[in-house]
Image (spheres, rainbow, N blue to C red):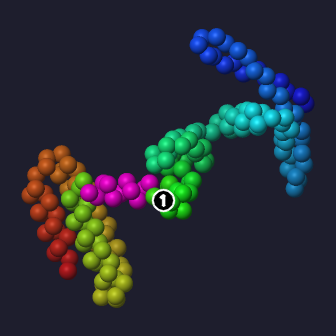
């Protein structure tokens, strides 16, 4: 089928129409029927991609790290794309979440204390001086306390909350 679609563009409140043309064909591949497009220009490729995004009800987000647009996979909300950082060779999704955690850590003393205790106790698990089950129980119990006390500290700024939390995490030796 030949399809001709006109797209409306506005420049300085003057509307112009641009025609895009493409040919669709039904293609059988491994027992499934797919639509194949025959396009005639780079503009047509971009238009077919746009139509496909719209037909699939795809959601687009802007990466908080690199600022580029990306299509959400399975409409799963994500703040970072999967493009590789040119310097690190690692995707924005990994770098962005790590950077956000580090920033959060620098702003929250309770999280800093929790991380110190976590690393100390995890080192004991790795050196067989603590059972994994005991460590997991500590993490579950302390995480709940950490979250509650971090919110209290954020709300009040009372340094006594930090001191109390330090006592709680240091008691597990």
**12 up-or-down from 60: above or below:** above
Q: Quadrant of residue 136?
A: bottom left
Q: Foreground: 164 or 20?
A: 20
**140 up-or-down from 65: above or below:** below
What is the residue that sits farthest to the top in this orientation?
Answer: 14
Q: How many marks?
A: 1
Residue depicted at 60% across the width and 43% down the height: 71
Residue depicted at 11% across the width and 63% down the height: 163
Instruction: Tell me which segment is drawn in magenta.
Output: 96-106
Q: Which residue is mark 1?
A: 94
Other residues around mark 1 within 10 Å, as few (<14) / some (14–19) / many (≥20): some
Q: Foreground: 7 or 139?
A: 7
Residue 109 in the image, given as x and y percentages of width and height: 20, 59
Residue 79 vs residue 70: left or right? Answer: left
What is the residue that sits farthest to the bottom in this orientation?
Answer: 128
Residue 157 in the image, given as x and y percentages of width and height: 13, 49
- Quarter occupied by the C terminus: bottom left
Q: Foreground: 170 or 51?
A: 51
- Quarter occupied by the N terminus: top right
Residue 28 in the image, given as x and y percentages of width and height: 90, 48
What is the residue that sits farthest to the front in this orientation?
Answer: 87
Disc 1 element: helix
Secondary structure predominantly adopted by residues drawn in magenta? helix
Residue 82 vs residue 126: left or right? Answer: right
Residue 132 vs residue 87: left or right? Answer: left
């Amino acid at each position: 089928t030949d399809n001709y679609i006109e797209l409306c563009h506005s420049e300085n409140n003057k509307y112009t129409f641009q025609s895009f043309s493409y040919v669709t064909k039904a293609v059988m591949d491994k027992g499934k029927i797919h639509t194949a497009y025959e396009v005639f220009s780079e503009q047509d490729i971009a238009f077919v991609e746009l139509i496909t995004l719209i037909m699939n009800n795809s959601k687009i987000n802007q990466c908080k790290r690199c600022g580029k647009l990306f299509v959400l996979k399975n409409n799963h909300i994500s703040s970072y794309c999967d493009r590789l950082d040119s310097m690190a060779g690692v995707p924005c999704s990994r770098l962005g979440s790590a950077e956000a955690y580090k920033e959060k850590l620098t702003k929250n003393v309770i999280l800093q204390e929790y991380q110190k205790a976590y690393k100390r106790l995890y080192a004991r698990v790795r050196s067989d001086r603590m059972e994994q089950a005991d460590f997991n129980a500590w993490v579950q119990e302390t995480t709940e306390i950490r979250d509650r006390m971090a919110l209290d500290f954020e709300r009040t700024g009372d340094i006594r909350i930090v001191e109390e939390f330090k006592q709680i995490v240091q008691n597990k030796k």
